[in-house]
Amino acid sequence: DFSQHPNVLLADVYAGPSLARKEMLTGPDNQPYLAQRRNTEHRDWSFSAGLRASLLLDRHFLVRTGFHYDQVNEVFEYADPDFVQVIIRQTTQIINGQPVTVIDTLGVEYGEHYQKTYNRYGMLDIPLEVGVEVRNGRYGLSLNSGLSINMLFWKRGAILSPIDGQPAYFTPSSGTVDVFRRNVGVSAIGGVQWFCPLRPRLRVFAEPYARIVLRPVNLPNHPVQQR
């Protein structure tokens, strides 16, 4: 009874699918590398989930915070039909009393180099939102917007190296290239929630939302700016 209790504390648990849109930009000199990245990286279905506490004030006004998790999934797929691998052996021999390095070619392999890797980007955030809620009979609608502060940004997968154009892993501590920031910073968020009470203290809801990370997620020295 919101007329008798205009200030209410709500707790939400939610999960659902999401689809991430990626934007990549670079200068004229790196356009070939950008084209290669676009040809090898393809988006996949992602998901989000969270726990949220909302304080409803005067029956209609909302203040919200909690924990929100986004996982963005991609498919990295690379094929080189003209792959050539040279197998060499390097030894040190003593010639005329001096150590000399000798390199022998043991063989050459020809074939196709194919690699498929599922890239994962996980972001754990604390959202800070305000909103307004209205009800009409058994149903209701709320509008919410605010900022989301990133607490954790983990990543795993492969990307084309800007040095030689070959696949390289960017997974921290075990990768071979540094591509992404340690933290994505602040995001702008907004959503529309439709809800229906099932019992006096229980409701179900659907909430399409949008999130925009405000700064590029790559390191400044990487040739492609990724948002």
Image (cartoon, helix red, strand yellow):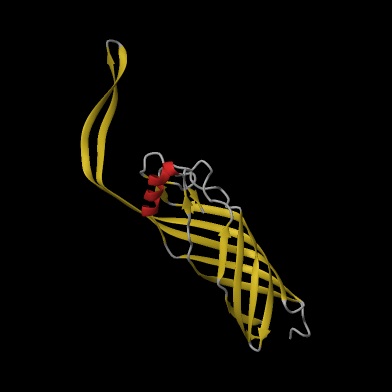
On-image quarter of the N terminus: bottom right
133 to 75, vertically: above or below? below
Residue located farthest toward the right when viewing the structure as drawn: 4
Viewer-closest of 151 and 164:
164
Residue located farthest toward the front when viewing the structure as drawn: 28
Classify residue 162 by image quadrant.
top left
Residue 196 locus on image (x, y percent): 61, 83
Give me the residue at 53% from left, 43% from top. Answer: 220
On the question of residue 176 being in view, the answer is no
Q: Does residue 132 appear to the left or right of 191 in the view shown?
A: right
227 to 63, vertically: above or below? above
On the question of residue 24 being in view, the answer is yes
Classify residue 207 by image quadrant.
bottom right
Residue 11 locus on image (x, y percent): 66, 73
Give me the residue at 40% from left, 43% from top. Answer: 161
Residue 107 locus on image (x, y percent): 21, 35
Residue 182 locus on image (x, y percent): 56, 48
